[in-house]
Amino acid sequence: MSEHVKKRFKRGNIPVYIALGFASALSIFPFYWMFVMATQPSAAYNSIPPTLLPGGMLIENFQKVLNTIPFFQAMWNTILLCSVVTIIVLLISSLSGFAFAKFSFPGKNFLFICILLTMVIPPQLGLIPQYYLISQLGWLDTLFGAGVLFLLNPLGIFLMRQYISESVPDELIEAAKLDGCSNFRIYRSIVLPIIKPAFATLGIIVFTLVWGEFLWQFTVLRDPSSYTLQVALASLNNSFNVDFGMLLSGVFWATVPLVVIFLIFNKWFISSITEGSIK
Amino acid sequence: MESVEKQQHVSSAKESRLSEKKKDMLSGYLYVAPFFIIFGIIGLYPAVFSIVLAFQEWNGLGEMDFVGLRNFTVVLQDPLFWKSLYNTVIIGLMGTAPQLIVGLILAYFLNMAAVRFTNFFRVTIFMPYITSMVAVALVFGVFFSSNETALANYVIGWFGIDPVSWKTSEWGAKFAISLMVFWRWVGYNTIIYLAGLQSIPKHLYEAATIDGANKVQQFMHITIPLLKPFILLTVFMATVGALQLFAEPTVFLGSSAFTRDEAMTVVMYLYRDAFSLGSFGTASATAILLLIIIVGAAALNTWLTSGAGRRKKGA
Amino acid sequence: MKLKKSLLSGLLLSMSALLIACGGDEDSASGEGKDVTLDFWVFGATNYEDLAKEYEEENPDVKINIKTSELEDHHNSLFTAISAGTGAPDLTMIEVDQLDRYREAQDRFTNMYDLGADEIEDQYLDWKWNMAANGEGDFLFGLPTDIGPKAMYYHSEVFENAGLPTDPDEVSELISTPEEFADAADKVLEATDKPMVDSMEMAFRANMDALEQSYFNRDGELLISENNGVKDAYDYAVELHEQGYVSDFEMWTPEWGDALNKGSFGVEMAPAWLKGYMTENAPEAAGDWRVTTLPSDFAGNWGGSYVAIPKETEHSEEAYEFSKWLLSPENQLESFTESGLFPSTPETYEMEEFTSNSDEYFGGQNTAEYFAEAAKEIPEVYKGPKYVTVNNEVLTALRNVQEGGDPEQEWEEAVERIEGLIDR
């Protein structure tokens, strides 16, 4: 935090602040509106012009959510699912990224292109065969079945390859090898500390992706005790008799933890910037 | 004695270097293996299944019938397929190109050492990616409703523009959806660029400052070239993402998503084939056509971007 | 090496954590010494969870696991399970428009007649029952749950200002044919400057839901190229539009909700389930709306479901016993009073609680009796597996007409699109 104090406000940067402030305001508006709706009765959603100030039903609406769905159970399932998937994706991606960036082996480029190509398969069509596969493996109703699809993350491998090849100097690896370090040791004690900011970036992207995904989780999880947040929230939304106050209260409180987690990961970004400025 | 020792040393070094090479190869294969193992278990079967389906007539429940290339001719002769491809490309251009440029600028601002509150800005700018689609759909639905009283119509009224029916007019729908795509993904790209900017060693900038280069020069000659791999990545991702566009238009258009053609994208077209027409054959054929288009477009875009970077470097 | 091992085991551990975490949950859910667990998939707002608890108390050896979701998600995951041939529940709700899609997969459902459904056939409305049977009448897909008989919701203040009667019986007497409906619309427009109908879809549905034969016959042949009722329904909607009687409030949008709240149009033709939405989302209009019978040419059904038993289940008898109990006239009355699911058992309409029902929101009127009356006049309809998609093309044509398209040309283009679609 101390480096923040060092930063002085400069007049020349005013346009930058205006641009960033404008972008922030636009970005945050739907989130704010979601909060407003979470504090209003259902009918506020229909009012024209729209309601823009919070009302007094914050607790009441959330109480309704708690009465309708197993909110905290679902949140625990979601946190468990997202954390494990994120950790595994970070491991797989950084290991493969390291291999693609720093080792030479026959077929390297071919394999890399194969990984990228898996990205272009539209996911919507795979639903039935994937579901069939998961049910044959006995993974229906398990968080494992709900998470396994997300372990394939070509973006992560690409991102890690790029980051490692630029920010981990070859000389450092050579030197470590001369000292007799195994490749895995190099990965652990040299590569991992350097790529922390990339971990923060990829981690938050994967975590958010799994947190917000609905269709697959909904198809695989059928037992209420295994529900994730998105699946549980879906039962709040039924078009014939929808209570928007309750629905948006559920959606809002299901998003708040993500913001908190992002704030925590945020520190990692900062540490890397600081390192740079000290050098 | 000495020379023999030396020789031995050299040869053992050679040996170890050879085995080092082998070790590297082994590690390389070992480290990339998890992805392919997982893909082999859960990704391969659906992919093969889709390819097989493209040559069958199947409604998801009954027997499959082999029909050869008929699915492809049906799709290629359907004007709606071409319309959906056109829509996808237009929305892709309007929604993704600006998003990359703005993302880059925002990331650059956020990475400036002299700017304060970056912590706050970083969180808020990433917010759209976190915000639930339900909330996004409701907000955009209200802002761009088809009625004359829609907020968006009020805003364009200031500029003397007549009200637009945002959900049912050719350009109204495309514009609103592009804006939604832009809004939702800017922060995402900003974060990736930010990771890229942080991989650039800071001493390069310090050296450039000493040499008297100004901020714009530094941006053009240090930032852009060193960020190139990340730019390539986002261009590739954005191309794939744009051609697979599905969530934003479906959510924005709601119940009329699959009935109108102003904003039907290719993936929506194939989804409708599969899940409401029960025609999995033509849906799979469309998926394969889309796959070819995506590979082509991604290759072209990445080639163009890397080519542009190279030329700049040379100049 | 050591590190590699520890990392690998960490990975395995975290993966197995996921499996164990959930496996454990499942055990605790299905345990408790119950002999049979029935998975039951439900959509929309029902009171089936409460009823299931009641049933569990009466039958301690049966445990019922309910999964509730939204209509579209529900049917998509059901389709996925039925198509993959694995993972379907023991019991599932199927909405009436979705039912025809599964006719081809008859072998994946249990024939309710085999379980003794013919014994309770008399309890249910004929048209509702027959729509779940196959063409030969020897296979029954499911037992009837609720139905959606349409009635006319009208805004009493708008009617009063237009010089029309406001008493439900007088209104239904005045508006008893499509022509009289148009006449009333004219008066409303003249006097209040408000449209009678909220959207082209409703104007079209007015006749459409009343048709015995719509787009397809049971052999799957497309009927609309010849002149059948669909074109007439289309023409009627176009005519109302040309007179200025139709607005452009799309159902479920905020503008539509606002219009209901403010009484921006005169009439909504909808089933009983709209009541729940109105009380929750148009509270300012409390006391303004009334319900009456539609002209008999408009009498139709919109929505409602069945409970079916997929073939996969190992407990078809227990599942049948439960669904029989769940959908009995007495429990349908409970579902009606609790969740507004309109009963498919005419017996229920005579029950004390049903006839003495009064709706605060509708000025103390007993709206139920108007829906009950409408329920008896409904034709038996065959919709066909591609009904929704085909119908959407006609709706597109109607929306284009509203935006200035030529009605005949739009119709021809819609027919052309439909012919291309069903060819797949």
Image: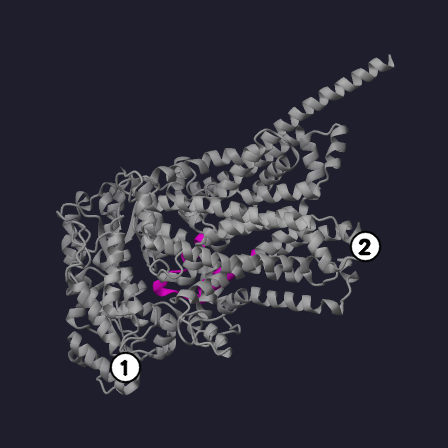
Q: Which mark is residue C156?
A: 1
| Residue A248 painted magenta | yes
Comparing C274 with A272, the one in front is A272
How many residues crowd mark 2 within 10 Å: few (<14), some (14–19), many (20+)? few
Q: How is the image coloured?
A: one colour
Q: Which mark is residue B211?
A: 2
Comparing B299 with A11, the one in front is B299
Q: Residue at x 37, y 50 (%)?
A: B271
Q: Position of residue A97 (x, y in %)?
A: 61, 39
Under circle 1, the secondary element is helix
Q: Is residue C331 above or below residue B51?
A: below
Q: Is residue C41 left or right of residue C317?
A: right
> Which residue in the rendered view is the most extreme toward the right?
B2
Q: Chain of mark 1?
A: C
Q: Quadrant of the N terminus of chain B?
A: top right
Comparing B69 with C181, the one in front is B69
Q: In the image, what residue type sits under mark 2?
A: Asp
Is any part of residue B281 visible from this angle? no
Q: Position of residue C192 (x, y in %)?
A: 30, 85
> Which residue in the rendered view is the most extreme toward the front?
B315
Comparing B27 with C107, the one in front is B27
| Residue C28 painted magenta | no
Under circle 2, the secondary element is loop
Q: Which residues are magenta?
A: A231-258
Q: State how far apart marks 1 and 2 are (Cα).
A: 82 Å
Q: Is residue C346 above or below residue C286?
A: above
Q: Residue at x 74, y 48 (%)?
A: B201
